[in-house]
Image: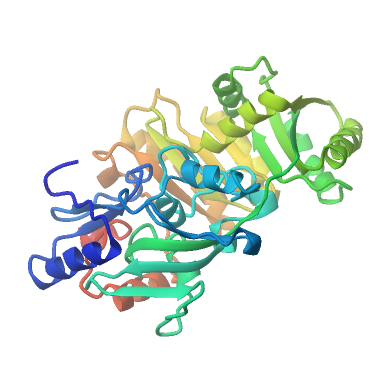
Amino acid sequence: MSETDWKPTTATELASLVLENFENERRPLIPCGGRTSLHFGYPVAGEPILVSTTALESVIDYPCRDMTITVEAGMRVEKLQEILREEGQRLPIDVPEGHRASIGGAIASNASGPSQFGYGTFRDYVIGISAIDGQGRLFSAGGRVVKNVAGYDFCKLLTGSEGMLGAITQVTLKVRPVVECRELVWVTVSDKSLIEPILDRLNLSATNPVVQDLLNSLGAAYVRNEAKLDLPAETQVLCLGFEGSQQEVEWQVRIVQEELAGIGEVSSQPLIGEAADQIWHALTDYQTASDDPVSFRSRILPSQVAEFFEKADEAEIAVLCHAGNGVVHGHLSDHVTDPHVARTILEPLRAIATRQSGSLTVTHCDPQWSSDMDLFGPQGSDWQLMANIKRALDPANIFCPGKLWRERN
């Protein structure tokens, strides 16, 4: 931590620091927890101060019978899950690098992993939130005490806000019971033309998978290697995950294998116990940038998955798609050593996504590359709405200026 970083121990102290900054220097502020998403967006303009929430890590209230918990935003996700497990409960969101990520940072980036297909994202679990705006004012919504302003739904507005609107200090979350059993099915698909029929068949399945992740061969090899398991990864792989009682999980695994067996050259292998947990963890952390020169997230229609994978294979991009949601995470090959080459590679993929009102966002690249990269692509009417909300809640542009709008740098 540099000498210009802040590490307040209470929300009141943080509010005082922000107010003093607003009344004097008005330096840019970057809220951060585990620092797992600091690379997202363009470099923040000016000489920013990192506002660390890691000392805000207390449990405020845990009425476990109500299936809710209120904690300070700096608590690590892994620690939160440990506290919940003691009461037979959990937050059913797979947060990448949960041992580092703070719950506030995970909410600000709306982080989620493979089980978002079955359980949703943080927008489905945040029922109360408190934060501090650029003028040092505390605002809150939801939870046991409602202090909403201007008609905004702050629980949803701050989820995925990337620190642009304020520093989250406290959250109240819905939680669920721990499941008895978890299994995965590793399905190899030899022909890309089978992807769409398989996804269509799963829409009519008698089973209810909570994970429905599709990987090309490069992505499958990455997941297999991270899990340190000997699994086939020469073609496309579909990972299906099931949770519940042991009886219902075993039934679903058997039925889904029978349903897929009649669709072309498809083979499947059930994974249980430690093997299932290792693959699940590798799928969760797949989106983490690692040493790849460029990583991206795209949003497409499920009907575009096969076409997107075809282009990704041509460019030697490792991709994973949450097939039921149309969210794709990709990593360019480390052979790409120039931002202009990276742009050329990404343009056809972005064209596929935007054709049906989707998007492609560069989530990580070398900071020196960002000035030559179009990180977000075409800005539609929703971007103007975001800019209006930013101006309403942070008129002095204190939090993360230039992170999304390069022209403000």
Q: Is residue 314 left or right of residue 76?
A: right
At x 58%, y 55%, the residue is 121
Rendered location of residue 182, percent (x, y): 73, 36
Rendered location of residue 110, percent (x, y): 48, 54
Quick one: which residue is furthest to the bottom in this view?
150
Q: Quadrant of the C terminus?
A: bottom left
At x 39%, y 72%, the residue is 384
Q: Is residue 13 left or right of residue 347?
A: left
Of residues 320 and 126, the one drawn nearer to the viewer in this rendering: 126
Quick one: which residue is furthest to the top in this view?
230
- Relative vertical location of residue 51 with respect to residue 328 in this rendering, above or below: below
Rendered location of residue 274, percent (x, y): 67, 24
Q: Quadrant of residue 231?
A: top right
Rendered location of residue 290, percent (x, y): 41, 30
Of residues 30 and 90, the one drawn nearer to the viewer in this rendering: 90
Quick one: which residue is furthest to the left in this view?
24
